[in-house]
Amino acid sequence: MVGSQVVHETLDGETVVINLATGTYFSLEGTAAQLWEAIVADEPRHATAVRLAGQHHADVDAVLATIDAFHAVLAEAQLITASSERAPDTTGNLGTLALPKLQAYTDLSEHLLLDPIHDVERGEGWPAVPST
Amino acid sequence: MQVPPLAPAAHAFREDLIERAVEAAANAAERHLLTLAGTSLTLDFGTTELAQALLPALSHHVVAGSPLQDLKPALQPAGVRLIVWSDPLPPFPWGGQHLGRGGAITGLSDGPVRAVATTDDSSLVLWDEHRQLACCWFAAPSSVTRWDRAAPLRVALHFALTQAHRHLVHGAVVGQGGRGVLLAGPGGSGKSTTTLACLDAGLDVVGDDYAVVDLRDEAPRAWNLYRSLKVGERRADRDDRRTLLLGADRPQQATMYLDLVAILLPRVTGGARSTLQPASRAAALRALAPSTLMQAPYEERPTLGALTALAQALPAWELGLGEDRGVGAITEVLAA
């Protein structure tokens, strides 16, 4: 399930995901974008694994393990609120399925999390970092 | 972390604040009618000191004939009303643990009324959508920060403009001949420097940090919000940051609106000449959305809708900023 302060949009095959709680934003392409769309569509993990295994001539168990590993990464980034407890093991035949990658951008986090309301120096303003 | 619930009296306190604001407006020291991004606003200041601190960056929107304090209430224009005052208030019935991102008060930012406060109790904003009323309280005129002076009443204006289908976007807008480009990127990407270079080169400037985007027409239109420009920078050995006002510190006036033709993603490259490379719409969204949304007031269900529509409506270019500060490349995009 996507977090309540997570916003996302897919444009021309690239999914942009922003975690407003952490200030980190992400780019997902290829397999990662496909898996994100499956999460948003609330497709069961196993159904996603079967579908992708068919498309990529891969073993369902290997794809399922790949999905679980990716969900764990998304959960760690606080993008989704639930993740499989299954230990991810991505060995096995993935056929033509590329491993999903999550491109994270943290360049804004420091300034973005300097809250323009709270984190202002009196007389200075945001984004001046408080000295104490 | 579980936030303890607010005392039941907090909602009554919120209503009391609105009544106090309306009462303060009845005795306002200054009242001004503004037309901002095509929207009419009435702006009441409880004291002259508050007006002197907060009005300069917005004064170019004041309609000729203001101040309106001589008008009877029945003759005053309808529309959104902002009240800015600093009378003493009772202790707030919330604590720091109730303040979420952007200072949104958990439990008081529901429904048509939104509440945003500072942890040091130096200021707060209440927006009442039904009454079309923003109540902006400062503990004292000295509570107004340099940031407040450069971008005054931003939270209240965000609420007021959003309900009028206009969207406050973090980015600079420059152009000429009625056509403009939106420069989107994080602080330090070169927006303000490029804006100043464009101003010096005779181009029009809508804003160097914020613009109000209206997506209802065929071409997205970027409206001016503030006439302030940030210049200078803070480094380890010096801090020469200051705010300039167009039409006061610089002879050029702010341009009220430009129709957008492109989104540019600036990045300092250091070459002699600035360069342009096509960028994807997703890249434009990545440049626009994070800082815009993170500076917007907390929403229970935030969306990318308007920013996605903007990224879809316009071509995007990566602008490699060289020593010419992008003026030639921007002129090229505007002429295309």
Image (cartoon, rainbow, N blue to C red):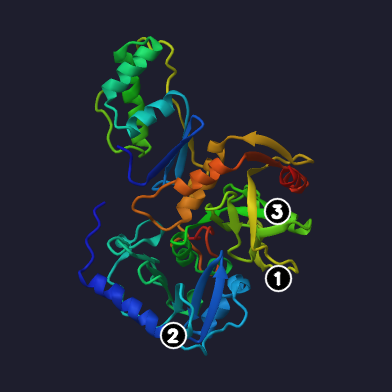
Q: Chain of mark 3?
A: B
What residue is shown at x 39% (from left), y 56% (from top)?
B298
Chain of the residue displaying label 1: B
* Circle 2 Cα neighbour tier, 10 Å, few/some/many (<14 / 14–19 / ≥20): few
Real-space CA distance between mark 3 and mark 2, rounded to the nearest whole angstrom: 41 Å
- Residue A70's quadrant in the figure? top left
Q: Is residue B287 above or below residue B23?
A: above
Same-chain check, marks 2 and 1:
yes
Q: Nearer the viewer, residue B328 or A111?
A: B328
SS at circle 1: loop
| Residue identifier under label 3 | B175
Q: Secondary structure at mark 2?
A: helix
Q: Earlier in the sequence, mark 3 or mark 2?
A: 2
Could you tell me if the residues under marks 2 and 1 are in contact, i.e. CB atoms within 8 Å?
no
Along the line of sight, the residue nearer the viewer: A88 or B235: A88
Examine the image and state in which quarter residue B136 appears. bottom left
Identify the residue at image location x=68%, y=54%.
B174
| Residue in front for this viewpoint, A125 or B32 | B32
In primary-sequence order, the first of circles 2 and 1 is: 2
| Residue drawn at the location 49% of the way across and 60% of the way down | A130
According to the picture, the residue beneath numbered tag 2 turns out to be: B74
Answer yes or no: are tags 3 and 2 on the same subunit. yes
* Residue occupying image coordinates x 33% and y 11%: A59
**Earlier-in-chain disc, 1 versus 3:** 3
**Amino acid type for the residue under numbered disc 2:** Ala
Q: List x then y, in percent, for residue B271.
A: 76, 39
- Specify the label residue B247 is tagged with: 1
| Chain under numbered label 2 | B
